[in-house]
Image: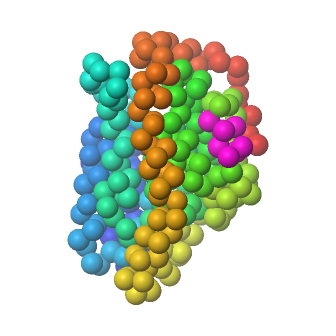
Amino acid sequence: MALRIERGAAPGVALASLDRPEKLNAIDLETAEELGSLWRELRYDESVRAVVLTGSGTRAFCTGIDRGVDVPQPPSPYAVDDPLLHIGPKANDLWKPVVAAVEGMACGGAFYLLGEAEFIVASREATFFDPHTTYGMVSAYEAIAMAQRMPFGEVARMALMGTAERVSAERAYAVGLVSEVTEPGGAVAAALRSAAVIAGYPTEAVQGTVRAVWSAREAARTQAMAQAPALIALGNLAPERQAELFAGRRDGGGGGEPRVR
């Protein structure tokens, strides 16, 4: 199992942990399926009224899609199959509140999950970045998710700077991406405290409030998401060229250490 679940981590709260620390909690097809199944299962579990989502270890919350995964694509340029589109709670019609707890890196496809959390708690050592452009890929769904949480200029900068720059937890807090910054190792405990408070309130009022908050931005998000497949199909380099760029970065090319701001 690539996903670890602890029900009752706090009263009425489930703790879900991406459990691939050796892969920096990158998501393979099995993990993607487990995430979708978890959210659908929790819709029917009345004992769980709030969820905390985190990653195992301290190096990374999640680093997106596992680069070793082969995702077959349809031959049509008008269709793109993205296994991460269905890993979030809202994509699976779960309207119980989800609090994300971030330790270490959160990048790329991690934003599919962070974008569908109600709010984010991060360790002081957490960093956020989007590597797509560095490797010849369009940041579409990720940038759209972050555009619901960050000012336009901050989203554009993060998406365009790729691996050259990382957003610190303090900067993420300043621009509204993160709602609370903790000492290293403290993100999960802080997220559980908040989730337990929420879980103690009447669930009908809580879920209604979650839906109300989401409805305020859903129209713009839906329209933007509809354009994403075409932008990806037109703008992505061929997979072979992406792999070359990724290998070059891993082997020490690509401009040295990223700047953290």
Magenta-colored span: 152-159
Please give left or right for residue 152 compared with residue 206 in the image: right
Q: Residue at x 33, y 47 (%)?
A: 86
**How many marks overall?**
0
Give the left or right position of residue 170, taking residue 211 as reference: right
Q: Is residue 66 above or below residue 148?
A: above
Which residue is at the front of the view, 5 or 22? Answer: 5
Q: Quadrant of residue 135?
A: top right
Percent position (x, y) of residue 78?
A: 34, 26
Vertical position of residue 191 compared to residue 235: above or below: below
Residue at horizontal 32%, vertical 44%? Answer: 32
The quadrant the C terminus occupies is top right
Give the image location of residue 70, x and y in percent: 31, 25
Q: Is residue 43 visible?
A: yes
Whether residue 156 appears in magenta in the rendering, the answer is: yes
Residue 89: name its quadrant.
bottom left
Front-most of residues 12 and 83: 83
Residue 256 lies in the magenta stretch: no
Tell me the colour scheme of the image: rainbow
* Chief secondary structure of the magenta portion: helix
The answer to which image quadrant residue 27 occupies is top left
> Is residue 64 something that shows in the picture?
no
The residue positioned 48% from the left and 64% from the top of the image is 214
Residue under the image location 68 percent in, 31 percent down = 161
Q: Position of residue 72 (x, y in %)?
A: 27, 24
